[in-house]
Image (cartoon, rainbow, N blue to C red):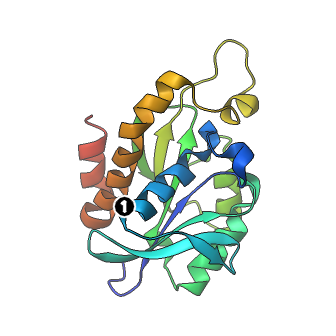
Amino acid sequence: MTDDAPWLIVGLGNPGPKYVGNRHNIGAMVIERMAADGGTSLRAHKAGALAAQVQVAGKKAIIATPTSYMNESGGPVVGLLRFFKVPLEQLIVIHDELDIDFATLRLKRGGGEGGHNGLRSISKSTGSKDYLRVRVGIGRPPGRMDAAAYVLKDFNATERKELDFLIPDAAEAVELLITKGLTDSQNVIHAR
């Protein structure tokens, strides 16, 4: 880690009002909350993202959501990494995760993308899978519902109530990653 380089925290989602409440947009929801908590608003950036410079746990950080569709997230992420001179090891991606129970958080660095097109795009564009991830559990689709259809559905009423706790918890996980590193953060978050 480079002390003078900022962190880049990217929340994945799809652009536009049609997708705002979708399960697939949980990463973007966390970034919006972080912006509000930091007393700032996201602004259009030439890399193809909405971004803001903030302090997270006393460190310089850029919070951002790509303005492209999920499966094209890599281009904006690489653009932001280059523009702000952020080393790949200081990239944190917040995303929805089907293979984790709803409202459960898991942290990791690298590994597979589990069929997540946003992660696949970032890995392809950066040439590496070795970046930090805040995996926000959305659970498996009910019955025989197609996973692609499920992630594009809004959270139901019960889930929306839980988001009031889940979103701040995910923002806290980001702070922990920055201040304590991966292993210590996993010990805190995974114990919940």
Image coordinates of residue 89 in percent, x first then y, are 45, 70
Specify the quadrant that holds the N terminus: bottom left
- The answer to whether residue 7 is above or below residue 177 is below
Residue 150 visible in the shown view: yes
**Label 1 Cα neighbours within 10 Å, binned few <14 / some 14-19 / many ≥20:** few
Furthest toward the top, the residue is 143
**What residue sits 59% from the left and 74% below the top?**
43
Count of numbered badges drawn on the protein: 1
- The answer to whether residue 76 is above or below residue 174 is below
- The answer to whether residue 111 is above or below residue 126 is above
Image coordinates of residue 103 in percent, x first then y, are 43, 32
**What residue sits 48% from the left and 41% below the top?**
136
Q: State the residue in front, 169 or 176.
A: 169
Circle 1: residue type: Asp
Residue 102 visible in the shown view: no
Direction from residue 76 to residue 103 in the image, left or right: left
Q: State the residue in front, 187 or 150.
A: 150
Q: Name the quadrant containing residue 45.
A: bottom right
Image coordinates of residue 75 in percent, x first then y, are 72, 70
Specify the quadrant that holds the C terminus: top left
Direction from residue 190 to residue 9 in the image, left or right: right
Image coordinates of residue 129 in percent, x first then y, are 58, 60
Residue of label 1: 37
**What residue sits 64% from the left and 39% below the top?**
22
Q: Name the quadrant containing residue 180.
A: bottom left
SS type, badge 1: helix
Direction from residue 1 to residue 147 in the image, left or right: right
